[in-house]
């Protein structure tokens, strides 16, 4: 791509949101440039749980060698309570994000996307008839920019204020080497969740190929000493604390932020589209990436890249998953206000947990779950108290 050419669209960031947005744009015939600051494959701290519901939004399969474990269930802990539910159908897969993301990006490149990795976007400047994107290496022109550059998004600064501290979670985690036999013995094909150890968050142990992915996350303001919280978590589980840790922010509770301005659309974490209860973001990265690309195609046909035109994308997101994130936030607040009721129910009653697993497994809406759960709370509490 020569620097004075005008691209139809530039996508900033080659995570799941940028990969799917760029793939969709290229498939629709747009000249698409994808800029990624790291060299692919790049490290990304993540549990790497990709739900069956998330996978249903892809129009290609995931190569077997990327699937480190399949997930059929969940074990949940809260205080002294512990329960485990296994399902017949697969709830999701466990992957390493470096390889998984590189694979999705390769699908975008196959579709015709021009990838420039190792190139960091430093500024963008909307003009009358184009937008100028400057990187550490080059200057490019485009009709429109899709900001898929994650939670610390540079592009989002041209759309809205930065996240406030109560709109962010902080996660700290590590990969703990283990033999596959040790992983099987601990949990094999399920995930292990520990509630009540951080505010608006949890600890996790996910089984992977020859290692565990272990971490703790919670709302930023409550994670005063994340390393201590994490080390205590590791010690309590009997894991070594001699590990290399990584920390990463995650957007929390966002479904109603500004996501467009003239010639700019935000997707994935840059837009704040993460489930506040589970921390699931890959699904919303896929869906918002696709919706943004489809919106860009319409703008291209009408040659209208104004905020007013692009704003219909926000409505599309709300209809697709925004309401679900809203109910997830309500449930999160409720659970954190009354943890002894709700986390106890989740960790002591198989029906409550099994129904809950319908969210990642079948894409069940939180609204439906809340409607099911609330009237049953007194019965389930009684059942828990009386052990019947
Ligand atoms: C610890 C942790 C565990 C998680 N576990 C899960 C999980 O198990 N399942 C799940 O569904 N979700 C999980 N999430 C959430 C999930 O990781 C994110 O929601 C998801 O990665 C969002 O995808 P994205 O493409 O929007 O952003 P990202 O995956 O963050 O990708 C953004 C990309 O933009 C690039 N970039 C940034 N700035 C620039 C720039 N200036 N120029 C060029 N490129 C740039 C970055 O290098 C990066 O490659 C987890 C998050 C954290 C922090």
Image: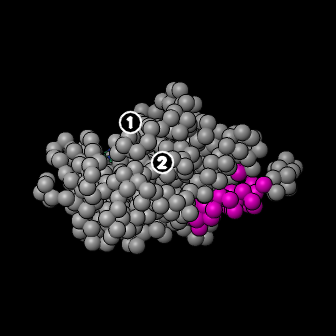
Residue 63 screen position, x and y as percent:
36, 68
Q: Which mark is residue 258?
A: 2
- 372 in the magenta segment: yes
Question: Could you tell me if residue 310 is visible in this image?
Answer: yes
Along the line of sight, which residue is nearer the eye, 331 or 204? 331
Is the CB–ligand 1 distance for label 2 below 8 Å?
no
Rendered view: 4 above or below 319 = above
Q: Quadrant of residue 337?
A: top right
Residue 291 screen position, x and y as percent:
43, 64
Quadrant occupied by the C terminus: bottom right
- 334 in the magenta segment: no
Query: Disc 1 designates what residue?
Result: 244
**In this picture, residue 329 sits left or right of residue 179:** right
Along the line of sight, which residue is nearer the eye, 160 or 324? 160
* Figure colour scheme: one colour
Q: Which secondary structure is most common in the magenta stretch?
A: helix
Neighbourhood count class around disc 1 (C-alpha, 10 Å): few under 14, some 14–19, many 20 upward: few
Magenta extent: 346-374
Along the polypeptide, which appears first: circle 1 or circle 2?
1
């Amino acid at each position: 791509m020569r620097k004075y050419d005008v691209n139809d669209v530039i996508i900033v960031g080659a995570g799941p949101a940028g990969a799917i947005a760029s793939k969709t744009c290229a498939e629709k015939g747009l000249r698409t440039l994808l800029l990624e600051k790291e060299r692919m494959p790049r490290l990304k701290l993540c549990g790497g749980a990709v739900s069956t519901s998330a996978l249903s939004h892809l129009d290609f399969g995931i190569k077997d060698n990327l699937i480190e474990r399949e997930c059929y269930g969940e074990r949940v802990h809260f205080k002294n309570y512990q329960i485990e539910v296994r399902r017949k159908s697969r709830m999701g897969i466990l992957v390493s994000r470096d390889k998984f993301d590189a694979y999705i990006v390769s699908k975008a490149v196959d579709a015709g996307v021009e990838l420039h990795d190792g190139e960091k976007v430093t500024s963008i400047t909307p003009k009358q008839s184009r937008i100028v994107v400057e990187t550490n290496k080059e200057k490019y022109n485009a009709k429109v920019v899709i900001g898929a550059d994650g939670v610390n998004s540079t592009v989002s600064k041209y759309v809205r204020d930065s996240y406030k501290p109560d709109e962010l979670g902080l996660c700290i985690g590590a990969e703990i080497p283990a033999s596959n036999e040790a992983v099987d013995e601990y949990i094999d094909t399920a995930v292990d969740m520990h509630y009540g150890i951080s505010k608006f968050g949890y600890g996790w142990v996910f089984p992977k190929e020859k290692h565990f992915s272990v971490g703790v996350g919670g709302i930023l303001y409550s994670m005063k000493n994340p390393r201590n919280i994490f080390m205590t978590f590791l010690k309590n589980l009997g894991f070594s604390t001699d590990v290399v840790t990584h920390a990463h922010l995650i957007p929390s509770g966002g479904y109603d932020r500004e996501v467009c301005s003239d010639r700019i659309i935000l997707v994935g974490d840059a837009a704040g589209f993460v489930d506040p209860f589970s921390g699931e973001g890959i699904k919303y990265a896929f869906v918002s990436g696709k919706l943004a690309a489809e919106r860009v195609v319409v703008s291209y046909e009408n040659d209208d890249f104004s905020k007013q035109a692009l704003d219909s994308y926000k409505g599309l997101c709300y209809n697709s998953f925004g309401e679900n994130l809203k109910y997830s936030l309500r449930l999160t607040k409720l659970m954190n206000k009354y943890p002894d009721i709700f986390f106890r129910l989740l960790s002591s009653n198989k029906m409550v947990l099994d129904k809950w697993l319908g969210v990642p497994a079948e894409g069940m809406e939180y609204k439906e779950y809340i409607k099911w759960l609330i009237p049953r709370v007194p019965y389930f509490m009684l059942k828990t108290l009386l052990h019947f």
